[in-house]
Image: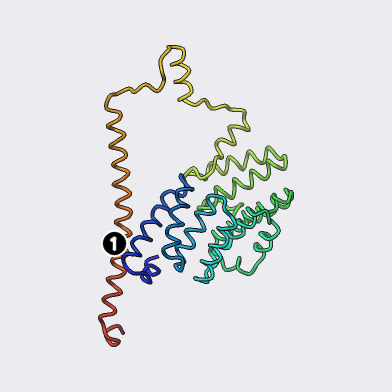
Amino acid sequence: MRQELLSLPKTLAEDVAQNLVMVARLIDEEPEQAYAYSRIALRLASRVAAVREAAGFAAYATQKYSEALAEFRAARRMTGHVELWPVMADCERGMGRPERALEMAGAPEVQKLDKAGQVEMRLVAAGARRDMGQLDAAIVTLQSPELASNSVQAWTPRLRYAYADALLAAGREDEAREWFAKALESDKDGATDASDRLAEMDGVDFVDALDEEQDDADLAGEPADAPADEDEGDDEDDDRAELDDVADEDVDDLDEIVAEAHADADADADKGPADQA
């Protein structure tokens, strides 16, 4: 991103960077807000590939698949890279075109992907098979050396989870439970809800602690959400201020990157051809 921002005037680069920070921070929890920030960045710098890519992911997160696909295609034209191929195929699925996603899964671009990208493409292809009602084909699609490997990689929990889910959809419950357990074992970051799926299969019901508090309060005739401490409001203000400080630090970091990039460019411009060589 640093090199791409060099193509912009310094002030404009800082504005774009700040909006991209907000997209990255909000896309998981507040995708609609992330999308709004991505549109601002897009208006400011539509010729920057990183901006088009960020806009694509923000649109994808809000299920605007046609718009996301257009942005991903634009970013790919600008860079020539193939990393976005799997998510582009998944956009085709989102638009109700699983056949097109399968065509992309068999395209030469897949061979240019790294291992993580190829696994992602396999997940998309299996999803397309399921969209078409081809459960057995989806299961076969997911059967791969990566699935059989005991080595745990970043993609391992999602691959095992997808396999378990496909098995369950095909009525193979015992196998599904085994693979949900394997997914949970490898999922140290909570990327899947494998534990919930296992509990559901075992007939375990979780009781929300907040619900229990409300029930107890109802029996006692007291509101469950009564403030426990007069300083609670102050604590919330402190938390909010802390979050604002973190946000400012993120923006400051990007501002520093942009400033350094432009300083480097200015220094190079001050040198003659011999000095640059």
* The image quarter in which residue 181 lies: top right
Q: Is residue 213 above or below residue 71?
A: above
Q: Is residue 84 left or right of residue 244?
A: right
Q: Which image quarter holds the C terminus?
A: bottom left
In this orientation, which residue lies closer to the viewer: 276 or 17?
Answer: 17
In this orientation, which residue lies closer to the viewer: 225 or 111?
Answer: 225
Q: Is residue 116 above or below residue 169?
A: below
* The image quarter in which residue 271 lies: bottom left
Given the image, on which type of amino acid does mark 1 rest? Glu
Q: Is residue 241 left or right of residue 52?
A: left
- Could you tell me which secondary element the residue under label 1 belongs to? helix
Residue at 38% x, 61% y is: 16
Residue at 33% x, 62% y is: 14
> Label 1, on which residue?
256
Residue 211 x/y as whole percent:
48, 23
In this orientation, which residue lies closer to the viewer: 123 or 230?
Answer: 230
